[in-house]
Image: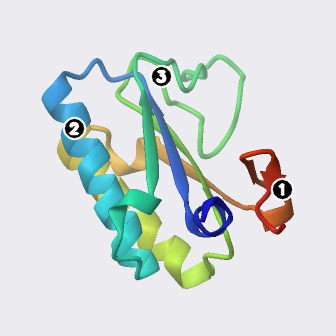
Amino acid sequence: SAAHLLRTMPHLAVKTNVDFGAKQADELLSRASQIIAEVRGQPDLRDIMVSLSARNSCFGASAGDGVGGAPFAGLSSFEPNAFCYYVGVAEGLEAKKAMSKKLAEMMEEVMGVERSKMYISFNEVLPENMGCNGKTSEE
């Protein structure tokens, strides 16, 4: 059911300033879905959503501009970088740590984004805050 999918369907939105081709995009989407499925112990990839946005200037701070601070200080928006926004239901700390590590490794391999220039925001969503088919997923 749609309610079941929304309760279990995680979403990873990836924004990067890397100008990539279709082959890289396909590899990123496939590998990210597999990582999420593996960490969650979720065998069905159809219940995982990954989106990718290209040519975004993720970080505007550069060395000496007085903006930011650790960890953003010295990061130029022209260097390959990425920001990921993950939405899921009650993933747990160990799953988040594993996902962060594996996704950073994958971004470095596929997109050339150094691990130190990729950030992930993990966001847990309650079923009543998700909707589909005119209903919230807790209905």
Q: Quadrant of residue 78?
A: top left
**Label 3 residue SS:** loop
Q: Nearer the viewer, mark 2 or mark 1?
A: 1
Instruction: Specify whether 130 is left or right of 5.
Output: right
Q: Are marks 2 and 3 in contact (CB under 8 Å)?
A: no
Q: Position of residue 22 (x, y in %)?
A: 19, 25
Q: Is residue 126 visible?
A: no
Which residue position holds label 2? 26
Residue at image position (51%, 18%) is 57
Give the labeled residue for mark 3: 76
List the residue tagged with mark 1.
Answer: 129
Q: How busy is the neighbourhood of tag 2: few (under 14 within 10 Å), some, or many (20 plus)?
A: few
Q: Residue at x 62, y 69 (%)?
A: 4
Crowding near the residue tagged with mark 1, few <14, some 14–19, many ≥20 C-alpha atoms within 10 Å:
few
Camera-nearest label, 3 or 1 = 1
Viewer can see residue 17? yes
- In the picture, the quarter occupied by the N terminus is bottom right
